[in-house]
Image: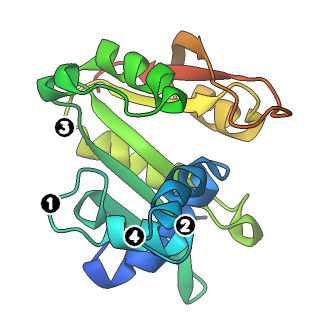
């Protein structure tokens, strides 16, 4: 069924698509974070800042850690994953909104961490997310696999649950705006293959 989906290692020239898909995967949280750099004059728009971040040579969670799915002749989705190293214990959140996610990540050091998994809306439901998830599990090389998603992202929770992920912990999300919908960040893990 998913033989028409091709996966490839991302290249630096994919940075724009990576920024868009990381923003989709985070349901706008990434562009919210990148907006601070617009305010400081580093870039003109949040997505431009995201593109710059994704194109950095040595950035964790950048193009070197990304796998792109293509379907029907176009980029369809992305998964960005990496080994969660012990050095994360020394990182402190620079803004309150990232504190809960960072605290959850610190509990799964040594696992393969999927930081983003996103598929363009018009290409969802045909197995692209599942294919990217399977690839990340393979890349984990017998390590446990972990990820964080929002408690109100039912599609993501369902996909991960169907593929052996279990809820390991939750942390209340810091509201981005006064009228933000309340939710929690859910840490999900899958045992080593």
Q: Which mark is residue 46?
A: 2
Dot 2 or dot 1: first in sequence order is 2
Local secondary structure at mark 3: loop
Residue 48 relative to residue 121: left or right: left
Dot 1 or dot 3: first in sequence order is 1
Q: Which mark is residue 131?
A: none
Q: Which mark is residue 58?
A: 1
Q: Image height check: is 139 above or below 173?
A: below
Residues at marks 1 and 3, CA–CA distance in whole angstroms: 22 Å
The residue labelled by disc 4 is 42
* C-beta proximity under 8 Å, tags 2 and 1: no
Residues at marks 2 and 1, CA–CA distance in whole angstroms: 20 Å
Residue 3 visible here = no
Residue 148 relative to residue 193: left or right: right
How crowded pointer 4 is (Cα within 10 Å; few <14, some 14-19, many 20+) is rated as some
Q: Residue at x 50, y 24 (%)?
A: 164
Residue 107 relative to residue 39: left or right: left
In x, y percent, where is residue 45?
56, 73
Mark closer to the observer (1, 3): 1
Residue 137 or residue 187, whichever sits in front: 187
Residues at marks 4 and 1, CA–CA distance in whole angstroms: 19 Å
* C-beta proximity under 8 Å, tags 3 and 2: no
Dot 4 or dot 1: first in sequence order is 4
In x, y percent, where is residue 179?
86, 33
Dot 3 or dot 2: first in sequence order is 2
Residues at marks 2 and 4, CA–CA distance in whole angstroms: 10 Å
Local secondary structure at mark 4: loop
The residue labelled by disc 3 is 141
Residues at marks 3 and 2, CA–CA distance in whole angstroms: 34 Å
Mark closer to the observer (4, 3): 4
Q: Residue lying farthest right?
A: 179
* C-beta proximity under 8 Å, tags 4 and 1: no
């Amino acid at each position: 069924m998913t033989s028409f989906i091709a996966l490839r290692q991302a290249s630096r020239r994919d940075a724009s698509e990576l920024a868009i898909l990381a923003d989709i995967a985070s349901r706008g949280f990434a562009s919210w974070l990148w907006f601070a750099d617009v305010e400081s004059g580093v870039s003109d728009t949040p997505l431009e800042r995201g593109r710059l971040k994704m194109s950095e040579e040595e950035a964790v969670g950048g193009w070197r850690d990304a796998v792109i799915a293509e379907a029907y002749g176009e980029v369809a989705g992305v998964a960005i994953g990496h080994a969660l190293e012990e050095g994360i214990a020394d990182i402190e959140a620079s803004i309150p909104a990232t504190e809960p996610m960072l605290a959850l990540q610190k509990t799964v050091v040594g696992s393969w961490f999927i930081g983003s998994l996103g598929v363009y809306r018009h290409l969802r439901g045909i197995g692209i997310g599942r294919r990217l998830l399977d690839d990340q599990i393979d890349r984990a090389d017998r390590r446990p696999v972990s990820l964080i998603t929002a408690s109100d992202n039912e599609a993501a929770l369902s996909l991960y649950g169907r593929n052996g992920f279990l809820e390991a912990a939750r942390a209340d999300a810091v509201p981005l705006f006064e009228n933000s919908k309340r939710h929690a960040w859910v840490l999900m893990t899958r045992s080593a293959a």
